[in-house]
Amino acid sequence: MYTEKLPRTWSAICIGIYVVGVAYMGFDSVPEDTGPWLAVSAVFLLVLIPCLSVPISKAIYNRIHIDPARNLLRVGRERMALTDVDPASVVQEIQRQPLSPAQRYAASLGNIDAPVPGLRASDRAAPRLVGGGWGVPMGMKSVEIRTRQGERLSIATHDRMAFLTALAGSTTHGTPENR
């Protein structure tokens, strides 16, 4: 079983700054100016929400869970059987040289699968992005594997080698030939 933990540093920093700022304003204004303090706190909350939108979308669309007992690979909102994943493509991806940080950022800019004509992965003959998101978040690593039917899939991950190692172990032991 493998579950990829998403980093929470950015969320903790944003929420911490919000709480400290609201508390600092509250010490000077509460109890006599509680109404304006609540109003300003709500306005600052409107700034906090966009700052948390990326970590929230990563948790929805890029969460990875491998469960060999149930023969399940779950990426974001999408589920697929581990027996559908081609083990040779996983081994091939493990052997591929990882990208440098600059190459990774450039690759994530081009890895788009938005529901707009011309930006669909099928329109551009690119691998389909798994999970339900429209693109790989900047800075995340992208893994390209194939299904047994030959469909190319792209999966965004934080820890490329840990994910590929867990997937290789799950697909090798879960193939019908090895049962």
Image: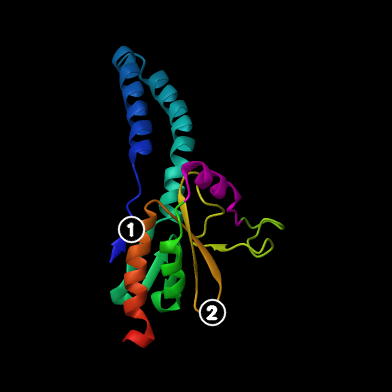
Which one is earlier in the sequence, the residue at label 2 or at label 1?
A: 2
Q: Secondary structure under badge 1?
A: helix
What percent of the width, then of the height, locates residue 95?
42, 62
Name which quarter of the figure residue 113 lies in: bottom right
The residue that appears at 48% across and 32% down in the rendered structure is: 46
Q: Disc 2 and disc 1: Cα gap in Å?
A: 25 Å
What percent of the width, then of the height, locates residue 100?
47, 45
Q: Is residue 160 visible?
A: yes
What percent of the width, then of the height, locates residue 131?
48, 60
User: Which one is in front, 73 or 15?
Assistant: 73
Placement of the N terminus among the 4 image quadrants: bottom left
- Residues shaded magenta: 99-113
Q: Please say if 72 is above or below 60.
A: below
The residue that appears at 64% across and 58% down in the rendered structure is: 115
What percent of the width, then of the height, locates residue 30?
31, 17
Name the mark on residue 149: 2
- Where does label 1 land, which residue? 162
Q: Please say if 145 is above or below 12.
A: below
Q: Is residue 109 magenta?
A: yes
Q: Is residue 103 left or right of residue 71?
A: right
What amino acid is labelled 2 in the image? Gln
Q: Please say if 133 is above or below 29.
A: below
Q: Secondary structure under badge 2?
A: loop
Q: How is the image coloured?
A: rainbow
